[in-house]
Image (spheres, rainbow, N blue to C red):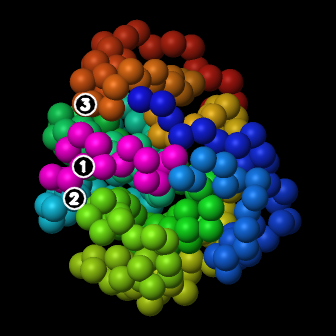
Amino acid sequence: MKPEPIDRYALARPRNSHWGSAARRGACLAAILLGVSACYGAGAAHEPGGARAADEESDLYSDIPQDGVTLGDPGAPITLTEFSDLRCSHCRNYALAVLPVILDRHVRPGQVKLVFRNLAFLGPGSVRAARMASAVGMQDRLWDFVDRLFRLQARERPAAITDDLLLRVAAELPGVDAARAAAEQDSGEVDRQLEAARAEARRLQIRGVPAFFLSRAGEEPRRLRLTSMSPEPFSRAIEQLLAAPRTAPARGR
């Protein structure tokens, strides 16, 4: 699996550039549009399990605690962090075909908690989706929203991610106040969350999505080098980390 590349300027936005609001109004983000057609379209029809998963109703998370971007037992010994983009077909394939297995094997048993980092670099539609996902996450339903949006894209192949489409997805989630999410998607808290994801991606030198890191409290994240998008490489890495001796605490963490 070759990750979708991130343009070298994509993670270097100046703090005062009003990136989020301008992008939501449809501004052309030329510095971060590289590769959009490759991620959203080419190869998507051949994703293993994608068509099957897209036709299933999404109720993956009803028995798993959510807190903002985090899914799973807060006391789980291992954290699996995913860097993603909501228009990336490889990210979608992971969410629909691989993630359900990880939930059953490692999240529900309390071994692993998941963290979602949205880089939103594939154009204005990505930014719109990221902002709405973060706003829904303020109601602790981010993971449900991401799952529903990926399934909708796999099933309907929309030409664009519009505000109306995102509002529709949010409104379909039980317990979510879609109007509140729409009002909060331009909030300072959403800005902070997206900037934090970009800053972490810069620190970890991420060059493409999806990207995955495993970590334990007090230790530096370990990047997963995946040769295939299937559950087995994840399970092997998780089991190895569970059995590994602890390393020295990371500085400044």
Q: Give the residue number, with chain letter if any, for mark 3.
A: 231
Q: Secondary structure at mark 1?
A: helix
Q: Secondary structure at mark 3?
A: helix
**Residue 90 lies within the magenta run:** no
Residue 134, numbered circle: none
- What's under tag 3, amino acid-wise? Pro
Q: Residue at x 41, y 29 (%)?
A: 1
Q: Give the residue number, with chain letter if any, for mark 1.
A: 50
Q: Give the residue number, with chain letter if any, for mark 2.
A: 54
Q: As drawn, is 23 to the left or to the right of 163?
A: right
What crowding class fits label 2: few (fewer than 14 Cα within 10 Å), some (14-19), or many (20 or more)?
Answer: many
**Residue 51 lies within the magenta run:** yes
Q: Residue at x 84, y 57 (%)?
A: 14
Figure quadrant of residue 185: bottom right
Q: CA distance from mark 1 to mark 3?
A: 14 Å
Q: Which range of residues does the magenta coloring cover?
A: 38-53
